[in-house]
């Protein structure tokens, strides 16, 4: 027997559906909790969706986003705002790099190499190279994001080594390379490891 809904109940259901559709219109605050994305229709940033990530005041990631704020590199996530305890960045489409086309992988590697060189020239070593940290922006460009396991360098020296004790990729490189601890060369090594299986 089919379950029948009253006109009033259908109206409520339709209202919920409309509200859900409307929640994707325009820019809004987006954040993650327990692996799920949540949206706030009452908060916007110049008509664009944004992801708000908590950061430690004066911490590595907060400092890096501050250094990159206003950057012109097209393959780094757009940064909308940096405060003492959070950053607001563009929302990216992720988990899209499972394509088998060798040309596509070559494009990814070429663009990310340009990002790596840009970051190094600006005193940042990314370290955490993996496909999970690459997404696609609303402009269709590949974008690197997530700097919580990255390093800050000055004069060839790593300034935040203690902050990287829990970063698996960096610690793995130290184990593989032994006493070889030049941060730029470690970054180059981890980049090549990430893309080693590509055509």
Image: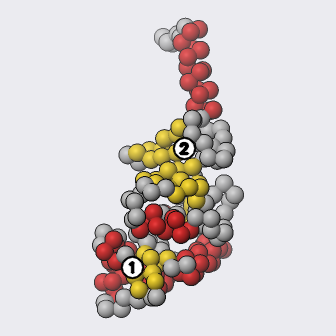
**Callout 2 crowding tier (Cα within 10 Å): few <14, some 14–19, many ≥20:** many
**Circle 1: element type:** loop
- Number of marks in the rendered image: 2
In the rendered structure, find residue 29 and report the number of the disc placed on it: 2
Q: Position of residue 86 (x, y in %)?
A: 46, 54
Residue labelled with disc 1: 159
Residue drawn at point x = 55 percent, y = 78 percent:
122
Residue positioned most to the right: 139
Residue positioned most to the bottom: 179
Q: Foreground residue, 159 or 89? A: 159
Q: Position of residue 139 (x, y in %)?
A: 69, 58
In the rendered structure, find residue 131 and report the number of the disc placed on it: none
Residue drawn at point x = 61 percent, y = 38 percent:
24
Q: Foreground residue, 120 or 56? A: 56
Q: Foreground residue, 50 or 187? A: 50
- For residue 79, above or below residue 100: above
Dot 1 or dot 2: first in sequence order is 2
């Amino acid at each position: 027997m089919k379950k029948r809904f009253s006109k009033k109940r259908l109206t409520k259901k339709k209202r919920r559906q409309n509200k859900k559709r409307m929640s994707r219109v325009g820019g809004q605050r987006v954040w993650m909790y327990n692996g799920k994305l949540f949206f706030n229709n009452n908060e916007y940033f110049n008509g664009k969706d944004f992801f708000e990530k908590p950061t430690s005041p004066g911490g590595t990631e907060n400092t890096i986003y501050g250094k990159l704020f206003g950057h012109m590199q097209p393959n780094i996530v757009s940064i909308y705002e940096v405060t003492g305890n959070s950053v607001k960045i563009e929302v990216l489409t992720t988990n899209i790099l499972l394509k088998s086309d060798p040309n596509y992988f070559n494009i990814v590697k070429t663009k990310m190499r340009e990002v790596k060189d840009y970051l190094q020239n600006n005193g940042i070593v990314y370290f955490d190279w993996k496909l999970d940290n690459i997404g696609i922006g609303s402009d269709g460009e590949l974008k690197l994001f997530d700097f919580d396991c990255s390093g800050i360098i000055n004069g060839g020296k790593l300034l935040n080594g203690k902050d990287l004790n829990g970063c698996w990729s960096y610690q793995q490189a130290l184990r593989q390379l032994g006493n070889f601890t030049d941060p730029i060369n470690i970054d180059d090594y981890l980049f090549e490891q990430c893309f080693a299986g590509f055509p």
